Image (tube, rainbow, N blue to C red):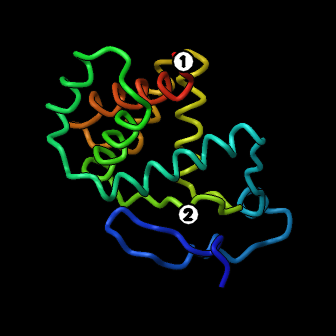
Amino acid sequence: MTASNHAFFFDGRLGERPSSSGVLAFPRCPTAARLAETHEIGTEERIDLDRLRWMALRSQLAPRPDLERACFLLAGETGVSFERFAIAFFRGLDARSQRGMVFYRPGARHLSDDETWLLRLVSAWRRGEDKAAGALVSWRVVEPGRRWLRFLSAGMVRAMDGR
């Protein structure tokens, strides 16, 4: 079994990549064609994705902080590192996501749906599309944590870009 077939889940399980299709494909069906498409990413996005995958793994080793308190501490400091924002973001995502998030091991060729969502979130923050980023967070995070995850994801992207 190759490394690209393994995924890690936020509850610590290591498992097989979920099958991409539980649907019987009919010729010329737009849904079947969309499911068959793969999301190809460029070299820069691949580097960002691997950095984020490493941070998701590292966050599993970090203690579970009080999300609100962690955000207040990060907001009060200047020059906060990418690592601190990312670990707080992934720990918050673990606690406040609507369902279990799936991230593959660093270096895996394939992308999970959650990784595609994460790359879209990073891209929205980089383009300055605050409302789009907020909508993406709202799509995956339950109400009490949305504000904090928007703050953490924006800070994580700024720190990732060195701004």
Distance in Å between CA atoms under marks 2 and 1: 29 Å
63 relative to 151, above or below: below
Expressed as whole percent of the image width and height from the top left, the position of residue 28 reads 85, 63
Numbered badge on residue 34: none
Residue that carries the numbered disc 2 in the rendered image: 105
Q: Is residue 98 above or below residue 162?
A: below
* Residue beneath the point at 52% across and 52% down: 53
Look at mark 1 in the image and give the residue it sits on: 129
- Which of 127 and 6 lies nearest the eye of the viewer? 6
In the rendered image, the residue lying farthest to the right is 28
Name which residue type carries label 2: Arg
Image quarter hosting the N terminus: bottom right
Query: Could you say where residue 142 lies in the image, as x and y percent from the top left?
Result: 27, 43
Give the amino acid at mark 1: Glu
Tell me which numbered mark, 2 or 1, is placed earlier along the sequence: 2
Horizontally, is 149 left or right of 23 in the view? Answer: left
